[in-house]
Image (tube, rainbow, N blue to C red):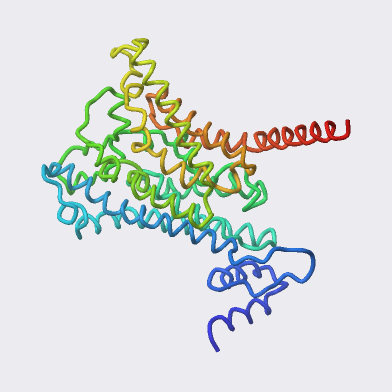
Amino acid sequence: MGLKENLHKLKLKYKDKKMAPAFNAIHTFLYLPNETTHSGSHVRAADDLKRTMNTVIMALVPCLIFGIFNAGYQYYSAINGFPEQFSLFEHFINWENFVLGASKVLPLVVVSYGVGLAVEFLFAVRKGHEVEEGYLVTGMLVPLIVPVDTPLWMLAIAVVFGVVIGKEVFGGTGMNVLNPALTIRAFLFFSYPGWMSGDKVWVHSAVEKSGVDALSGETVLGYLANAKSFDYSVADMFYGFIPGSIGETSAFLILLGGLFLIFTKIGSWRIMLSAVLGTLAMGLIFNGVVNAGWITESSKFYALMNLEFWKHLIVGGIAFGIVFMATDPVTASQTNKGKWIYGFLIGFISILIRVFNPAYPEGVFLAILLMNVFAPTIDHYVVQGNIKKRMKRLKLKTA
């Protein structure tokens, strides 16, 4: 008898027991649910929540692998100096970078999934409902949006907070108002700001092994916020050979992931496109302010305002946020017109916060959380507007 049949027997044995949700979750995770709808109207489709989550994870895996290599590359480059003639296979994709990166990144993934799923199972068993697959994506997103040297205990506390406060108190997957991964990120930012905004946290700094006092790992946005110059080229920023959170540095892989989500109809192209337009619009406004001479070089906001409007998309976490978090189907706007408004405001507000928050020059996660709160309101007024238009057309026809 195979594993599937044994799990099915356990499901039947513990059907009315306290631990039934745990056995059901294991069975559903490994195999398709063996239950069918017997009454009521429903739509037959090839996808389910597990397939949707797995599709998003497939889009995230390249960012994870790249982040592992980049963690090692940034560390060794900070010690030995960045190579003048960069070779992808010699300096980036090599065993040393992978081993160091994996030793730092994989524990974050294990803690994220281990703690998050433990909380999910605990709530499922306690409340007697099924364990849902919503945390499969959240568990992958969390380690990709934090610095490489984030302490594991700190991440564990943040995950517990994000799952409980960000999702379970609202009723679980599908009922949450805020994106759980960004709730975890916000908890880390406000509870441990030194670990999320310092210039020494974006590159692994094993001082006792490197023999140096500290490793400078300031991000591009950090350089700009402090009016410093940097040596990263446009290609470096686009392909991701720069310091930053583990999964957010490579705009190229994020772009491929976004196209994959659009192709599989998991991610909303309306939200992605409108968020890009909002980012470019705010960047153009700031460029116009600088060109008009309203802001001088002595201003602390000058460097970020003067950054070419399109470069905002390839530095920081805005591209990652737009593709993988703004498009969350639970917390985003549901109407087509609402998606355009929702996405545009995310991009617009992200650059606004990025420029005027020099202490931490990144605003995409705050912008998305803010728009998560207003998404139902946007949809409400979109629906009410459509109702008024239809009522007006009805009156004209009956007049």
Residue at 77% x, 63% y is 41
288 displayed left or right of 176:
left
As displayed, is residue 19 above or below residue 352? below
- Which of 239/93 is in front? 239
26 displayed left or right of 243:
right
Q: Residue 91 at what x, y percent from top left?
A: 16, 52
Q: Residue furthest bottom?
A: 1
Q: Residue furthest right?
A: 399
Q: In the rendered view of the protein, which quadrant contains the C terminus?
A: top right
- Which of 304/127 is in front? 304
Q: Quadrant of residue 4?
A: bottom right
Residue at 31% x, 30% y is 222
Q: In the rendered view of the protein, which quadrant contains the N terminus?
A: bottom right
250 displayed left or right of 191:
left
Q: Residue 134 at what x, y percent from top left?
A: 56, 56
Residue at 52% x, 59% y is 53
How many labels sit on residues? 0
- Which of 157/380 is in front? 380
Residue at 29% x, 24% y is 226
- Which of 48/46 is in front? 46
Q: Residue 44 at what x, y percent from top left?
A: 67, 66
Q: Residue 161 at what x, y percent from top left?
A: 54, 45
